[in-house]
Image (cartoon, grey):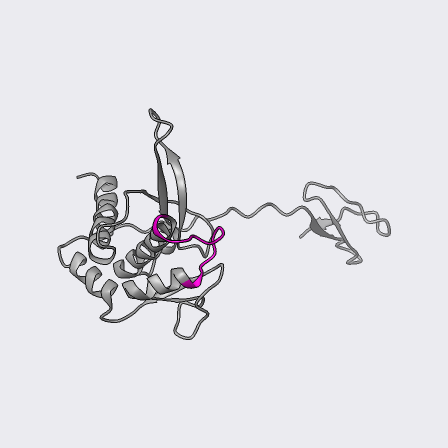
Amino acid sequence: MSMTMQEYQTLDGAYKFFNRKLFASSLPECLIVMQRKGKRNLGYFHPNRFTHRLDQNKHTDEISLNPDNFHGQTDEDILSVLAHEMVHLWQQHFDEPPRGGYHDKRWGRKMDEIGLLPTNTGQPGGKRTGQQMHHYVIPEGPFDIACKDFLSSGKNLNWNSLPIMSAKSPRSKSKFTCPDCNQNAWAKPTARLICGICEVAMLAE
């Protein structure tokens, strides 16, 4: 089995398993993708994000997970983000979805129901509603039990993305110093400066 198939089969299998165990098999299919979006973003839900290439009247939703934030997380942590986004999908189809990106009380109640406690800090005691929201797994709650059951079958996630190292931009200016009087000046690194006092070439730092 290819690496791509193995990783996405785990995510697809988790979606189907959680749909059955936590949502009574009520959720429609969706496309699950891995996509980098924001340093702090763990995942997101986007309704009607895709249309079928041969049937423009057929649409489906998107659930995205950010692989840049897999590092240091357990499989249960990552799959709890999937379940978090599944609650957004549930709300889109069976409840009243709020304005884009907002996490309201109705979403929070469904999170409680499946065993994820909503909090803006990721820890107990945080706000339960807001634009940027996280959650934590309720021990022995429905999600915790379902996730352990799913992972016990040997399913697992294998890959973390490495951080992208941005190259430092070259300095726009360098410091030049006269070797005789220590007078300083700043100019482009390629400049050739002469000290106006000593009339000698200034040295770049």
In magenta segment, residue 22: no
Q: Which residue is depicted at the point 38% across and 55% down?
A: 69
Question: What's drawn in magenta, residue-wise?
Answer: 93-105
With respect to residue 61, does 87 lie above or below? Answer: below
Left or right, 115 with reference to 189 = left
Say left or right for 28 vs 184: left
Is 203 left or right of 120, judged from the image as shown? right
Q: Please identify the residue farthest to the left as the structure is shown.
A: 153
Residue at the image position 47 percent from the left and 59 percent from the top: 132
Residue nearest the observer in this picture, 182 or 175: 175
**Residue 31 placement, left or right of 37:** left
Res 121 quadrant in image: bottom left
The residue drawn where x is 68% and y is 44% is 189
**Which residue ends up furthest to the bottom in the rendered image?**
125
Q: How would you classify the magenta stretch by its main secondary structure?
A: loop
Query: What is the count of numbered marks?
Result: 0
Residue 149 appears at what percent x and percent y? 16, 60
Relative to 113, residue 102 above or below: above
Residue 169 in the image: state x and y as whole percent: 58, 46
| Whole-percent x, y for residue 92 in the image | 38, 49
Q: Is residue 95 magenta?
A: yes
Residue found at the very far front of the displayed protein: 95
Q: Nearer the viewer, residue 188 or 75?
A: 75
- Across and down, in percent, residue 83 comes to 30, 56
The residue sitting at the top extreme is 54
Q: What residue is rendered at 32% in x and 66% in y? A: 112
Q: Nearer the viewer, residue 39 or 142?
A: 142
